[in-house]
Image (cartoon, rainbow, N blue to C red):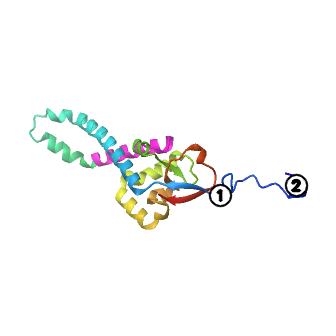
């Protein structure tokens, strides 16, 4: 471009796609997110069930008739904490490494930051905390206060969204949000 005849060249930052229109990011529906969560819940619960069954083997052969019931009652708070930590680790790992847990992969959705980029470990941990430890409260408050971008409260705190994936050639820098 000749700066004398046509003015200065445009700035390096893009305003939109090649045709200067904003690019859409399609937010994943609550239904898709729930189904992905349910798939993950089933997978992790099966793994935890096997783990807890293996840990309970010594109590199966207890000489006391109520040994198993006694062990279950004493370990119940530990069971909840261990389960929540397992879910937290599972989601933090997958949200950080690829943005997709197994359930999200199956439904073709992904967790990203607000610009569509991969999240770091700290952000993934913050985002995963709500669905690991406080899911009902996290979702209900998200529906009430952040529904314009379909964020749970911990999505809002971590500045993340869950999107439907598109082909690579449709992705550019400027983003506009739309519900599916």
Residue found at the far right of this picture: 4
Which residue of the protein is positioned furthest toward the bottom in this rendering?
A: 144
Q: Position of residue 126 (x, y in %)?
A: 47, 52
Q: Residue 160: in sight, yes or no?
A: no
Front position among marks 1 and 2: 1
Q: Is residue 128 visible?
A: yes
Q: Where is residue 48 drawn, in percent x and y?
A: 30, 40
Name the N-terminal-most of marks 1 and 2: 2
Circle 1 SS class: loop
Residue interval drawn in magenta: 78-101
Residue at horizontal 24 percent and vertical 45 percent from the top? 75
Residue ID at (20%, 33%):
57
Helix, strand or loop: magenta stretch: helix
Asked if residue 165 is among those painted magenta in the image, a careful observer would answer: no
Mark sitting on residue 3? 2
Q: Residue at x 60, y 44 (%)?
A: 169
Q: Tell me how far mark 1 sits from mark 2, CA to CA.
A: 25 Å
Q: Residues within 10 Å of mark 1 (few under 14, many from 20)?
A: few
Disc number for residue 21: 1
Q: Identify the secondary structure beneath mark 2.
A: helix
């Amino acid at each position: 471009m000749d700066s004398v005849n046509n003015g200065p060249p445009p700035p390096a930052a893009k305003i939109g796609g090649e045709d200067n229109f904003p690019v859409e990011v399609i937010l994943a529906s609550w239904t898709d997110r729930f189904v992905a969560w349910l798939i993950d819940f089933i997978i992790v619960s099966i793994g935890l069930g096997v783990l807890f069954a293996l840990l309970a083997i010594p109590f199966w052969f207890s000489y006391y008739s109520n040994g198993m019931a006694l062990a279950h009652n004493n370990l119940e708070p530990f069971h909840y904490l261990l389960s929540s930590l397992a879910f937290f680790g599972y989601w933090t790992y997958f949200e950080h490494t690829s943005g997709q847990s197994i359930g999200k992969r199956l439904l073709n959705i992904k967790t990203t930051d607000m610009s569509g980029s991969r999240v770091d470990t700290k952000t993934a941990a913050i985002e995963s905390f709500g669905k690991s430890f406080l899911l009902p409260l996290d979702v209900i408050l998200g529906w009430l206060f952040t529904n314009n971008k379909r964020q749970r409260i911990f999505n809002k705190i971590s500045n993340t969204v869950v999107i439907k994936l598109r082909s690579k050639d449709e992705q550019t820098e400027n983003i506009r949000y739309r519900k599916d």
